[in-house]
Image: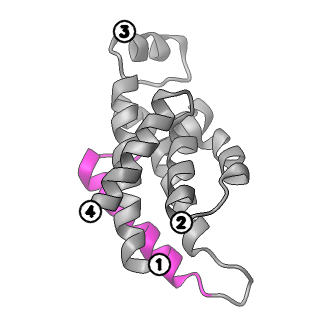
Amino acid sequence: MEQSMKFGKLAEAHFENGLLCAESVVSAIAEYHGVDDHLALKMATGFCSGMARTCGPCGALSGAVMGISLVLGRESQDDSVAVTYEATQEFVKKFESEFGAKDCHELLGCDIGTDEGMDYFRSQNLRTNCSNYTRKATEIAVIVLSKHA
């Protein structure tokens, strides 16, 4: 539990210092696992803001799934997907249970791909919610990984 909070706070700090949600989560999970996050960070960018503001899955959720795959993913076609899928399913279920949804627009109550949605996002200071999703997604992922890695 202490590890999960440590890396959750790290992800939140990344977010508060300019990284976006998916980038922050995958970077913190990479550090948790002791691997370089350079490529993972680059790969995460398009997953931020609900898949580039298209009302897709929450970027923090996507970053956590990328982090789980970074740690548990296959290295060849002969490897099984079972452990990665099991951990991912457990993570998604816990995230959805915690927040009631997994898609960005449902979590925020607005479509940030529109001017009206972005105005609402800013006026309601919903970035604070995103910071919380980022921290908590990392915490949940680290807990799940500690059971599977």
User: Mark 4 Cα within 10 Å, few/some/many (few <14, many 20+)?
Assistant: few
Q: Position of residue 59 (x, y in %)?
A: 51, 42
Q: Secondary structure at mark 2?
A: helix
Q: Amino acid at mark 3?
A: Ser
Q: Is residue 45 magenta?
A: no
Q: What residue do we see at 33% from left, 46% from top?
A: 101
Is 56 on the left or on the right of 12, as rendered? right
Circle 3 is placed at which residue position? 123
Count of picture labels: 4
Q: Position of residue 91 (x, y in %)?
A: 38, 63
Against 114, residue 107 (above or below) is: below
Q: Is residue 111 visible from the viewing direction of this image? A: yes
Query: Depth-wise, is mark 2 or mark 1 nearer the camera?
Result: 2
Q: Amino acid at mark 4?
A: Met
Against 1, residue 117 (above or below) is: above
CA–CA distance in space, label 2 to label 4: 16 Å
Of the numbered discs 2 and 3, the one sitting upstream in the chain is 2
Query: Depth-wise, is mark 3 or mark 1 nearer the camera?
Result: 1
Circle 2 is placed at which residue position? 33
Q: Amino acid at mark 2?
A: His
Of the numbered discs 2 and 1, the one sitting upstream in the chain is 2
Disc number for residue 1: 4
CA–CA distance in space, label 2 to label 3: 37 Å
Query: Depth-wise, is mark 2 or mark 3 nearer the camera?
Result: 2
Of the numbered discs 2 and 4, the one sitting upstream in the chain is 4
Circle 1 is placed at which residue position? 149
Q: Nearer the viewer, residue 131 or 78?
A: 131
User: Splitting the image into 4 quarters, where does residue 126 fall?
Assistant: top left
Against 65, residue 147 (above or below) is: below
Query: Depth-wise, is mark 3 or mark 4 nearer the camera?
Result: 4
Q: Secondary structure at mark 1?
A: loop
